Amino acid sequence: MLNKLAKQFEALSTERQKEAQDHENACSWEMSFIAYWSILEDGLKLFAPLGVREQLHTKIKEWDAFLSGKKDQKPKDIRNFSVEHKTDKIPPIQTIEIILGEMPKVAEVIEPKKKWRNRRNEIAHKASKFKNEALFTEYKNDVLMAVDELNTNITNACTRIK
């Protein structure tokens, strides 16, 4: 399953990077930034169901240990038995890191109160613009570093399961 998702991510990344470059060549920095951002956002959403399932599996194992007498302390109640990421929002980084490992740059860039996510929202919801190409380049490079980190972690996770 992980290898299948890795291939989907690779295809998504290739397609969106081409779109982003086309927008950048036309000096449409905002659309280019959104295209780069969408690689990160949609890439994380691809792996969210695996993370949600693993979180549930961990909780079930805790309950199994308690019910079989291997643990004395009662675990927290399991309130949700969903195995899907049922929202179009960016999944919590902890959900993704369960599957792909720690990703500090990704966590920083997608953080809701940080400048990158704010910029994405300002462009998408208020049609704001970058003041100059240098500012666009700074934001783009940070997002691409996060995309590279995500890609590296996907590759490493696929290597671990082989």
Image (cartoon, helix red, strand yellow):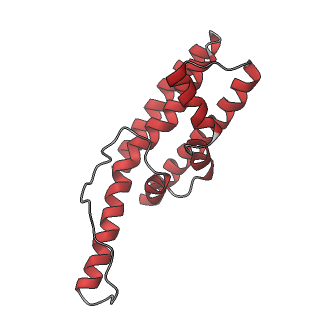
At a point 31% along the width and 89% down the height, the residue shown is 70
Q: Where in the figure is residue 78, as x and y percent of width and height?
A: 27, 67
At a point 33% along the width and 74% down the height, the residue shown is 76
For residue 4, which quarter of the picture? Answer: top left
Q: From the viewer's perspective, is 117 left or right of 82? A: right
Q: From the viewer's perspective, is 76 left or right of 23? A: left
Q: Where in the figure is residue 138, as x and y percent of width and height?
A: 72, 31
Q: 59 or 130: which is nearer to us?
A: 130
Count the marks.
Answer: 0
Q: Can residue 4 be seen from the camera position used here? A: yes
Q: Where in the figure is residue 13, as x and y percent of width and height?
A: 49, 31
Q: Where in the figure is residue 151, as x and y percent of width and height?
A: 54, 43
Q: Tell me: residue 95, above or below residue 32.
A: below
Q: Residue furthest front?
A: 126
Q: Tell me: residue 8, above or below residue 101.
A: above
For residue 88, which quarter of the picture? Answer: top left
Q: Residue furthest right?
A: 134
Q: Residue furthest top?
A: 26
Q: 133 or 147: which is nearer to us?
A: 133
Q: 71 or 114: which is nearer to us?
A: 114
At a point 49% along the width and 31% down the height, the residue shown is 38
Q: Quadrant of the C terminus?
A: bottom left
Q: Can residue 17 be seen from the camera position used here? A: no
At a point 23% along the width and 84% down the height, the residue shown is 67
